[in-house]
Image: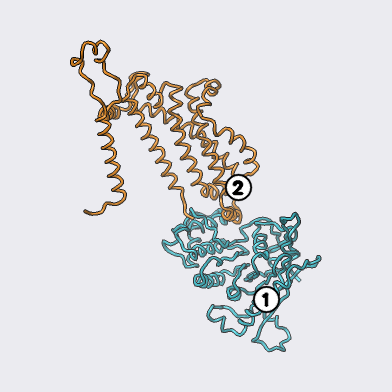
Chain colours: A cyan, B orange
């Protein structure tokens, strides 16, 4: 069994707590992501999603365990892993275009100024920002536009892995819907591997190939890996018609509502904590011998 | 009558206050009595000699016209044009100030980036900062043995603190998100400092620079009164010794005008580096 493209192996994170002991956020968490896959991680606040994200980005170091990407161990931040932060993290003294150029120039130090700008404009256009709008400073852009710039900056660098930390958390529902579709479009064009944190069940179903479900902390686990058995291309209005949509959605709601609590607080006692694969597919006859066969395999 | 804008109304009121103030000032100066109208006793008591009095504004305007129409004349050590005197002062202020900036801004970066450096240097800063810059003068004169360089040193020591503290504060307060952006883009320490931390902290740093230049201009007048020779501070004191109050008042006004221009220059710089979040 070969290692997946991104492999998280027995990751443990502990923090000292106020009483002088340690709090274990998660323990021996193991899962993998395949190349080109779009994976969302869903869980309650404080379960350690952002901690996992920081470790994947290289901004934080785990207490123990390892992350390998494409055969190399992840240690420290890298241009191979692009990050879109929840609060956009654009540099406010630079225009939208210059913010994207900032990333592109860091990625391609040998490129000429014109090359960097052309490339940046191309990616800004992919998220619908063109013309004079790109010359505005972030403070002169709406929240939705800022997050578009941030997404363009991340995609323009063509990293091996794109990490999205609740990118639409601060946006209103309508803007969120538009940008989700833009994200799907740009993802379809680039075949980028994406790992995304979200709180929004519908968002996760719309975007993801697979949803990782996390239990509450402490001793949080990535308990299940739910396949999204809805064919692409997807659109918000069409997926709700799909027979699998509500079945999957109900499963996710049940998990977040009950089992995330029931499964929490259990130390692993040294066992590797891998998620259990869940396939919900009502379009197939119940007696089908291999329901996974049509889906992308997850080898962990 | 059309409504004037707030700016126009303010300017109008400002001019009105100036005119009224000057008229009161002019009217408040008593006429010198003619010597011929005095009794013999009054003349014996020195009543005929012109009394030293606050000059009326009209004299000051005439003096200003005379000085500003030929600001760079040089007729010996005690008689130089106002432009030359201000030039000397500016030269001292700017050399001391830029030396201070060259030390304070890199040091402030270090203190802002490193909590250890902050804790190590903070006690010294706290003790040295409240010292009146002129208190350094005797020590400076003794060690440097040059009045010119001592004046520059005094400017250096008074303008270093606001720049140092503001730089440290600005650098320490750069949002972690922006530093993370630099880190995820694999920027080296120098690129991070110049492309992310410097622009992020620039408004705070320039605020410190603006405070410093104001203080430096306040201090140079006093420093030049002590070291003498040249400069606007020396000029004020020299004209006081000459009992030429017209020149004293004129030079006070010039100090104010130059100070205002220095502040305006840094205000413009502040606007240039400002950003909205």
Mark number, residue A44: none
Q: Is residue B43 left or right of residue B256?
A: left
Indicate which label's residue lies in the foreground, 1 or 2: 1
Residue A107, compared with residue A168, is above or below; it is above
Q: Is residue A115 left or right of residue B184?
A: left
Residue tagged 2:
B189
Q: CA distance from mark 1 to mark 2?
A: 42 Å
Rendering coords of residue A95 (x, y %): 47, 56
Quarter residue A251 falls in: bottom right
Residue B37, compared with residue B157, is above or below; it is above
For the residues labelled 1 and 2, say whether their Cβ atoms are less than 8 Å apart. Answer: no
Residue A135, compared with residue A260, is above or below; it is above
- Residue B85 visible at all: yes
Mark number, residue A226: 1
Residue A48, compared with residue B245, is above or below; it is below
Tell me what residue is drawn at x 65 percent, y 86 percent.
A282
Rendering coords of residue A17 (x, y %): 72, 56
Q: Could you tell me how many numbered marks the image carries?
A: 2
Considering the numbered disc 1 on the image, is that residue within a helix, a strand or a loop? strand
Q: Nearer the viewer, residue B198 or B111?
A: B111
Q: Nearer the viewer, residue A259 or B170?
A: A259
The answer for which chain carries disc 1 is: A
The answer for which chain carries disc 2 is: B
Tell me what residue is drawn at x 56 percent, y 78 percent.
A234
Considering the numbered disc 2 on the image, is that residue within a helix, a strand or a loop? helix
Rendering coords of residue A40 (x, y %): 63, 70
Q: Nearer the viewer, residue A179 or A76?
A: A179
Q: Is residue B36 left or right of residue B105?
A: left
């Amino acid at each position: 069994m070969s290692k997946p493209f991104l492999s998280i192996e027995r990751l443990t994170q502990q923090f000292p707590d106020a009483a002088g002991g340690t709090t274990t956020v998660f323990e021996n968490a193991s899962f993998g992501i395949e190349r080109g896959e779009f994976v969302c991680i869903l869980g309650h606040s404080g379960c350690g999603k952002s901690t996992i994200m920081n470790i994947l980005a290289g901004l934080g170091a785990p207490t123990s365990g390892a992350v390998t990407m494409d055969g190399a161990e992840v240690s420290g931040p890298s241009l191979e892993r692009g990050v879109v932060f929840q609060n956009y993290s654009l540099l406010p003294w630079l225009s939208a275009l210059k913010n994207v150029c900032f990333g592109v120039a860091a990625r391609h130090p040998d490129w000429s100024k014109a090359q960097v700008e052309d490339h940046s404009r191309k990616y800004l256009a992919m998220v619908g920002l063109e013309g004079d709008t790109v010359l505005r400073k972030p403070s002169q852009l709406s929240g939705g536009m800022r997050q578009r710039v941030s997404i363009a900056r991340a995609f323009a660098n063509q990293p091996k892995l794109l990490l999205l930390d609740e990118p639409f958390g601060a946006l209103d529902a309508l803007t969120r819907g538009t940008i989700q579709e833009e994200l799907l479009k740009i993802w379809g064009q680039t075949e980028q591997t994406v790992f995304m944190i979200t709180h929004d069940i519908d968002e996760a179903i719309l975007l993801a190939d697979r949803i990782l479900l996390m239990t509450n902390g402490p001793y949080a686990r990535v308990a299940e890996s739910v396949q999204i058995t809805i064919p692409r291309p997807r659109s918000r209005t069409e997926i709700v018609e799909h027979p699998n949509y509500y079945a999957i959605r109900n499963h996710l709601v049940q998990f977040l509502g009950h089992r995330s609590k029931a499964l929490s607080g259990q130390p692993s006692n040294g066992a590797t904590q891998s998620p259990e694969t869940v396939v919900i597919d009502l379009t197939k006859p119940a007696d089908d011998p291999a329901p996974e066969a049509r889906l992308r395999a997850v080898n962990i | 009558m059309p409504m004037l804008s707030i700016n126009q109304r303010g300017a109008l009121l400002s001019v009105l206050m100036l005119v009224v103030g000057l008229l009161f000032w002019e009217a408040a100066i008593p006429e010198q009595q003619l010597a011929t109208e005095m009794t013999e006793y009054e003349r014996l008591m020195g009543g005929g000699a012109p009394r030293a009095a606050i000059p009326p504004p009209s004299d000051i305007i005439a003096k200003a016209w005379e000085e500003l129409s030929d600001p760079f004349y040089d007729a010996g050590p005690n008689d130089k044009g106002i432009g030359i005197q201000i030039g000397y002062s500016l030269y001292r202020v700017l050399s001391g100030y830029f030396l201070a900036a060259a030390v304070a801004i890199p040091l402030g970066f270090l203190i802002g980036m490193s909590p250890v450096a902050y804790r190590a240097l903070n006690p010294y800063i706290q003790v040295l900062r409240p010292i009146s810059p002129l208190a350094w003068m005797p020590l400076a004169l003794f060690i440097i043995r040059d009045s010119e360089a001592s004046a520059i040193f005094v400017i250096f020591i008074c303008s270093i603190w606001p720049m140092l503290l503001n730089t440290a504060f600005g650098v320490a307060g750069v949002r972690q998100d922006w530093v993370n952006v630099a880190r995820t883009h694999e920027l080296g320490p120098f690129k991070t400092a110049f492309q992310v931390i410097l622009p992020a902290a620039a408004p705070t740093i320039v605020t410190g620079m603006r405070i410093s230049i104001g203080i430096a201009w306040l201090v140079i007048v006093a420093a030049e009164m002590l070291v003498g020779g040249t400069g606007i501070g020396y000029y004020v004191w020299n004209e006081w010794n000459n009992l030429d109050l017209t020149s004293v008042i004129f030079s006070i006004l010039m100090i104010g005008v130059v100070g205002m221009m220095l502040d305006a220059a840094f205000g413009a710089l502040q606007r240039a580096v400002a950003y909205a979040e």
